[in-house]
Amino acid sequence: MALRIQTFDNIRGGNTLYKALTHPHAAAPGHALVAALAARPPTVIVDPLGAAEGFAEIFGLGGVELAGIYVQNIAQLGKEVLGFRTLPIDELADSGARSVLVAAFDAERLIGQLQSYLPARAEVLSLDRMRIPEERLTNRRAYLDPLNFATNFALFRDTGALHSRVVTVNYWAGYGAAEIACWLTLFDGNGEIIAEWCERAGNAIAALTIDSREVRARFKLGDFAGQLFIHVAGAAGHDVVKYALDTFGESGLVIDGALSCTHDANAWPSDRYAGLPAPAPGERVILWVQNSHPTPIPAGAIALNPMGEEKRAAIAEPIGPFASRAIDVAELLPGLAWPRQIEVRAGKHIVRPRYEVVADGHRRIAHVNVERADLKPNPELPELGRWLGKGYLLPAPILPRGKWQSLALPTPMALSQAELPIAAIIYDPDGREVARYAFGRLPRNHAAALSLDEIAEPLGDGYGHVELVYDFAGGGDGDGWLHALFRYRHRDSGHAAETSFGAHVFNTLFIYRDEPQSYIGRPPGLSTRLFLRLGQAPYDTLCHLIYPASRPWSPESTTEITLYDGSGAEIARTGFTIPCSGSRLLRYHALFDAPDRERAGASAYAIIRDATCRLFGYHGLLSRGGAFSFDHMFGF
C-alpha cells in the first residue's frame, strides 16, 4: 500500500511535481478538479510529462469515467497508464470526451496548440486549477521551479507541559534573495488547520524563530500536537528549508527533563526509514506518524518490523490527511528491547518521522533516517584507501567522560546491507588516535551497542571524538551509506540525548563520485558554513566541532565564529584553530562575554565559517540540573 509517486532519488534529486501535488493549499482545488471531471463524463487525460499517475494517486479518480490517456512523446506510446494503453495525441478528437484533463502546470500554451484536436464541446481543464496562491511563489513564470516549493514540515506542539521552538536563519539572503516571506500553516493532531500566518524575514540574514507559546497566545489556541508546514517564498540558492527544533518542558522557573532538540524533517517521503531504537527497560519509545499528504493513510499501510526480520506489525487505524498519531512501538512489537533496532515501512506517506524516548521523567526527541533501496555493495571500496585513506567516515563527539556517558550503535540504512564491517577510531582533541575497536562484520539484525567510555580511557575525564569507518580486514562489503545512532547520558541527572547521521568523505583533494560533498559548487567543497542557534536565558549553548579528514589535510583549521543579533547585525567574532582529526568543545558563555551576549539579545545566533576545511558540528542546550539537548548541526 505504498504510494506510487516519485519523490526523490539520488541522481535527479527531488521531484517538484510531487511537492506541487501534495502542497496543503493545493488540496482543496485538487479535490475540486476531480469533482469537475466527474461532472462531465467521459474524461480523457493528456499526459505530456507523466503527471497523471501521481495526480490520481494523491487525489483519486473516484467518480471519474476515464476513457483514455493521450501522450505527445512517441517513446511513451503504447505504455500502460492508469489501466489504459497510451494513445497518440493527434487522435484526441476521436475520443468523444466531454472533459479533457491536461495533466500539467503552465498548460496554457499546450492547450492553445490542442484546439484543433479537441473533441467537440469538450471542456478542457489542467492542473493549473490547483496552483497555490501567487504570493507564495518565487518564480511565477515557471510553476515547477524547485524554488517555488521550498517547504518542510516540523513536529510542533504546545500542551502546557511541553512546547516547541523552530529556529532557522534567512540563509537565502546570502544567495541573493531579495525578500523572504515564510508562510506557515499549523495542523492539529486531526489534520485540521488551526492557524495560518506569514513571517517576513526581509533581505537580511536574520533569525527566524517560531515559538509554540507565542503562536498559541496569538491565535487563542488550546493544547495542540500536530505539524507545522513551512513554505518560504522568495528563496534563492537552496530549495530546502533547514531548521533546529527544540522541545522544552517548563512550568514557571522549574525546568523538567523534556529539554531536547533535533533538526529539519527532510522534505521528501521515503518507502522505508531505519535507525528507530527499541525501548530499553523502563523506557517508552513513541514514533510520531504525521501524514504529509492531502489523502488518508489507509489502515495497515504503515508498519514496523525488527531490523533484519520480516515480522511486520501494521498500524491498524487509518490516519487522515495531515493528521498526526503518536505510536508506542512496544504495542506493535512487544518484547523487542534495546539495543535492537526497528525498521519503519512508511510507504512514502510521511517525511522523515520523529520519535521520543520517555523514561524516569526525562524525554528526548530524535529522528529516523531514509533507508535507501537503490544501493548495492560497491566492490571498489576496499581498494579506495590508496587515494581516500579512511574513505567514508562518520564523526561523532565523545562528551567529557567525567560528566557524560557516550554510546554508538551502527544502524543499517540500505535494503542491501546484509552486514556492516566497521571499526571505531578514538581521537583526542588534538587529533591523536588513542584507541581503536573492531566491530567485525555486524549482521543486519545485530544488537552491538558500543560504550565509547570503555574504549576511550586514554581521554581520562576529558572529551574527544569517534570516527566510524569501514574495516575490510576480515572481508565483507560496503556501499558508502554508513550510519549510526549516538546516545549520550548525563551521569548525575540521568538526562539523555541522541542523534544519528551518515558517513561522508572528508577533506581530501581526490574526488570520488559526489564526495567530498559541497553545499555549493562542485566537490570537494573544502569549506564550512554552519548555523549555531543559541539558547535564551536560562540556557547556555554547547557546540562540539570536529575536523575529520579521510586523509591528512591542513595541520590546523582556521575557524571563525561570528555572533549576530536577531536582525542579522554582527555583534562580535572570535577565531581559533582545530588540529586535523581533532575537535573542540565550546560554550556560548565562554566564547562571548556578557556585554556582547546582552547586545546580541534573545534571538541571537552564530555562524561558523572556515575556508580551509570542512568541519562537522554538533550543538545543544544546557540547563540546570543536568538537562541538555544534543544533535548535529546544519550547514548551507
Image (cartoon, grey):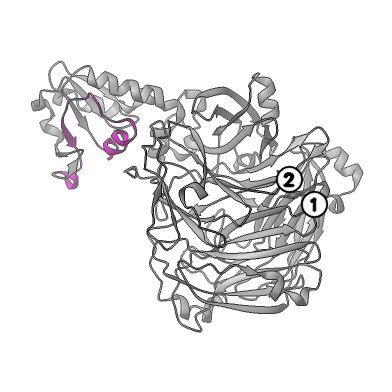
Q: Position of residue 315 (x, y in %)?
A: 42, 43
Please name the residue shown 12% across and 18% down the image: 120
Q: Farthest residue toward the bottom?
A: 473
Which quadrant holds the N terminus? top left
Amino acid bearing label 2: Gly
Magenta span contains residue 61: yes
Which region of the structure is painted magenta? 48-77
Instruction: Locate residue 331 relative to residue 177 in the image: left or right.
Output: left
Please name the residue shown 38% across and 53% down the image: 312
Quarter of the image for residue 585 reads bottom right
Please name the residue shown 80% across and 68% down the image: 462
Quarter of the image for residue 491 reads bottom right
Q: Which residue is mark 1?
A: 626
Magenta span contains residue 293: no
Mark 2, other Cα within 10 Å: few <14 / some 14–19 / many ≥20: many
Label 1: which secondary element: helix
Q: Earlier in the sequence, mark 1 or mark 2?
A: 2
Q: Is residue 73 above or below residue 406?
A: above
Q: Position of residue 589 (x, y in %)?
A: 85, 50
Amino acid bearing label 1: Gly
Q: Position of residue 540 (x, y in %)?
A: 81, 47
Label 2: which secondary element: loop
Q: Which residue is mark 2?
A: 257
Instruction: Locate residue 525 relative to residue 45 in the image: left or right.
Output: right
Count every numbered label the image shows and give the total. Answer: 2
Residue 233, can we see it? no
**Tag of residue 592:** none
Asked whether 432 or 489 is in front, the reply is: 489
Residue 539, can we see it? yes
Q: Position of residue 450 (x, y in %)?
A: 62, 70
